[in-house]
Amino acid sequence: MISVIYLLASEIKLMLKRGSGFVGLALAACFVGCASTPPPPPEDVVQVRAQAWLDAVVASDIEAMYGFTSPAYQSAHSLGFYAKGYAGRSMWRAARLGSISCDDVEPVSLCKVQIVVSFRGFTMREELETSFMETWVQIDGVWYTKPD
């Protein structure tokens, strides 16, 4: 961070020497404002990805669901293998995200997302609700679901 600030200060000095004071000052204000904006919490980022994945699950879009798995998972497991893990999803009546908790390690690389599902089997009279945990991992800045 210090090197970025030093680089910005050097660029501003150079712009001021060249006579573009106002432009340099405006640019500096923009860079400082942008640099000081903290990234969103990992829970917020994971929530967006997990909701998109859950939307694909509810829509029975196996290819879209599979797209949320890591490249390493995809190289080791076929789409057909992955699909077997969600064979009972046709009984789902509704699904929503529950709690999201991420590890305390910096940088955060693992989050647990609770999935709450309402379902009714073929011979069931009433819907039941259950939940399960989905693990999400960050690889090279991208969050992926980690199937069991």
Image (cartoon, rainbow, N blue to C red):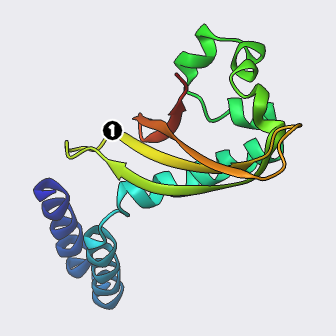
Q: Residue furthest bottom?
A: 22
Q: Is residue 82 left or right of residue 41?
A: right
Q: Quadrant of the N terminus?
A: bottom left
Secondary structure under tag 1 reads loop
Q: Classify residue 81 by image quadrant.
A: top right
Residue at 20% over, 78% down: 17
Q: Is residue 45 left or right of residue 88?
A: left
Q: Residue furthest right?
A: 122
129 w.r.t. 132: above or below: below
Q: Position of residue 2 (x, y in %)?
A: 10, 58
Please name the amino acid that badge 1 sits on.
Ser
Q: Position of residue 147 (x, y in %)?
A: 55, 25
| Front residue of this view, candidates 47 and 18 | 47
| Front residue of this view, candidates 140 and 67 | 67
Label 1, residues with CA under 10 Å away: few <14, some 14-19, many ≥20? some
33 w.r.t. 3: above or below: below
Residue at 38% over, 64% down: 40
Q: Classify residue 76 by image quadrant.
A: top right
| Front residue of this view, candidates 75 and 25 | 75
Q: Residue furthest top?
A: 76
Q: Position of residue 98 (x, y in %)?
A: 51, 57
Q: Position of residue 140 (x, y in %)?
A: 41, 34
- Pointer 1 residue: 109
103 w.r.t. 95: above or below: above
Residue at 23% over, 67% down: 11
| Front residue of this view, candidates 56 and 33 | 56
Residue at 22% over, 66% down: 8
Q: Is residue 2 left or right of residue 26?
A: left
